[in-house]
Amino acid sequence: MKPVLDVDLGGIPLRSPVMAASGCLRSIRDVHGLVDVRRLGAIASVSVTAQPVAGSAGPRVAETPSGLLHDTGHQNPGLDVFLAQELPVLARTRVPVFASVGGATLEEYLRVGTALAEAPGVVALEVNLACPSAERGGALFAHRSDHAAEVVGAVARSTRLPVFAKLTGDVADIVDIAGACIQAGAHGLTLIGSIPGMGIAPASRSPRLGAVTGWVSGPAIRPVAVRAVFLVSRAFPDVPIIGVGGVADASSAVEFLLAGAWAVQVGTAMLVDPDAPLEITKGIIGYLRRHKIADPSQLRLALRPARPAADGGSS
Amino acid sequence: MRRIRAEVLSSRNQGQHHTMTIVAPEIAERARPGQFLQVGMPADRSFLLRRPFAIYKASRQGGWAGTLEFAFGPGGAGTDWLRTVRAHQFLDIIGPLGRGFATPKNRNVCLLIGEGYASGQMYFLAEELRAKGKKVDMIIGGPTQEAIFKPIEGKRLAASVTVVTEDGSLGSRGTIVDVLAAMAGQTGAEVIYAAGTTPMLRAVAEYCGQQRIPAQVAIEEAMACGWGQCFTCVVPVLRKDGSGIDHQRSCTDGPVFNSSRIAWDALVPSATATSTGSGSGSGSEGAGA
């Protein structure tokens, strides 16, 4: 049996379950000869806001054990430049684009979301809810189910494209927030965005980031992400979930698929190894073949108990 | 830009610095002074990021044809590991990355400034400028004799080399900035190039601004990818219309910038308020120092 990699995220067919995560593949011309982008299942774009954002002062990245601490301050060219210059380059790859929608207000999310949804090459919107709200003292939309659902619902109602809500993992009850987004009209969920963090250099007594606090990504957050995917997919098994957070190799990708993800996004690993998505894709094929599994969807929540059952079952 | 598995030809201590020579013909063929390499770290370690290193020699002819050299100082986990890599082992290399130094068209007298092992890329630049018929003088500096990188190379390549150390253990006692005005005047510098710590670069930029001497500086900022995707290695650059600053990527828009374009106040405290030239060399290890 030859396994296939094709996945269907509830009406969004992808040739592979391996995507590029938002903000990690945003300048195609600079990866010429380095990344075979056509092998990606999809590309999540950088989060776009209505106006250009210059972003935070440096340093913007520091290493942390098995991860990165980073903050770009949402630097992006703004909606107009993104639509005119950056999105066409992504679309020309013919890889489906999940356009990431940012915003500081409900109105901004709506404006950006509706504009991106009309653009060629965009197959879905990914609403980045880890943006600070201008009207709520900088609280993240993703931190409360009502705030998240309000944005996701409004964007979903204003477009015919499927909307994925990208949630942060540092919340008390991810299932509650995910449920509110689904009820509001989210087609699917991207779990999880980077989680908040901070580092300080003892020698200089200065924060490691210019923005003082930032976001942690990479294998360091993988268990947090796997748990979020698992809890949400168990609660909403029919809702497409894209797993992200420390997907670094085929084994970690399969871990997310077993936890219930329909697809995975590769972020930090791609910044270290531009071939990571391709290696992961090959590795998933190998895993499916070895385990005689027809396609990645068969792995969803196909968990076995951590220990054999007490009645002596030996499998 | 290519990604290759490059064999290490040699790995050796050079004062407090370390140099590595690798076989990388595809990269050596096109590498220019100011460009850099991203060196992959071993899998299954807790430090993930590649380490960026300026290229200080790209040999295209002779017995060393097809080889590249880079140097680094005392650093953190990544460079500690790199020092253990021996000849005939392989490194995962991406390069050449970034935009290198530009050659002036109508200016012929060049003053090159290198601090610590950042002098290495200045030797590479000196070679290129000399081949183009330019006159090259150099200032190389560091805290101590141990920090001065291969001064003999400079003497071989430049019309004059001024060595400064803070403790006076080699050359004259002082900092690069202390001798800058005198050397620029003495050599009649028409264009200045500098690589090293950011406070020193700012001081050079301020001097060149006052004297209206064009200057190009190689900025080292902590970076994740190195090929333009993550926007973490940004440098604040003044907009041409004076309306503010843009954050440009040092990996692809730089690492070499025209010093007058940089919004120095947003990058580093003014040189007049801090001691300058005190570092041991430029950018130890990107984000993973």
Image (cartoon, grey):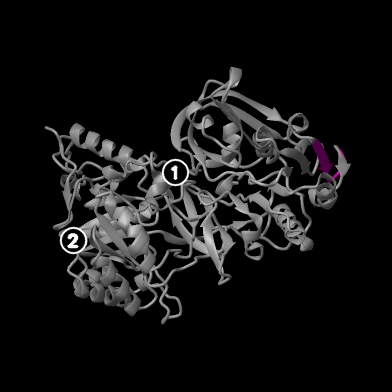
Say if the magenta span includes residue B163: yes
- Where residue B79 appears, as percent x and y from the top left, is 60, 37
In the visual, does A4 lie left or right of B262? left
* Quadrant that contains the N terminus of chain A: top left
How would you rate the neighbour count of disc 1 (Cα within 10 Å): few for under 14, some for 14-19, many for 20 or more?
A: many
- Where residue B224 appears, as percent x and y from the top left, is 49, 49
Kindly identify the amino acid type of the residue bearing the numbered disc 2.
Val
Residue displayed at 19% across by 62% down: A236
Residue farthest toward the left in the current orientation of the protein: A1
In the visual, does B114 lie left or right of A65? right
The kind of secondary structure element at disc 2 is loop
Task: Identify the magenta region.
Answer: B160-169
Q: In which quarter of the image is residue A234?
A: bottom left
Kindly identify the amino acid type of the residue bearing the numbered disc 1.
Val
| Residue at which label 2 appears | A239
In three-dimensional space, the C-alpha distance between marks 1 and 2, rounded to whole angstroms, equals 31 Å
Looking at the rendered image, the disc whose residue lies closer to the viewer, 1 or 2, is 1
> Which comes sooner in the sequence, label 1 or label 2?
2
A298 w.r.t. A129: above or below: above
- Where residue A59 appears, as percent x and y from the top left, is 57, 57
Residue displayed at 78% across by 63% down: B273
Host chain of mark 2: A
Host chain of mark 1: A
A159 w.r.t. A225: above or below: below
Main SS of residues in magenta: strand
How would you rate the neighbour count of disc 2 (Cα within 10 Å): few for under 14, some for 14-19, many for 20 or more?
A: many
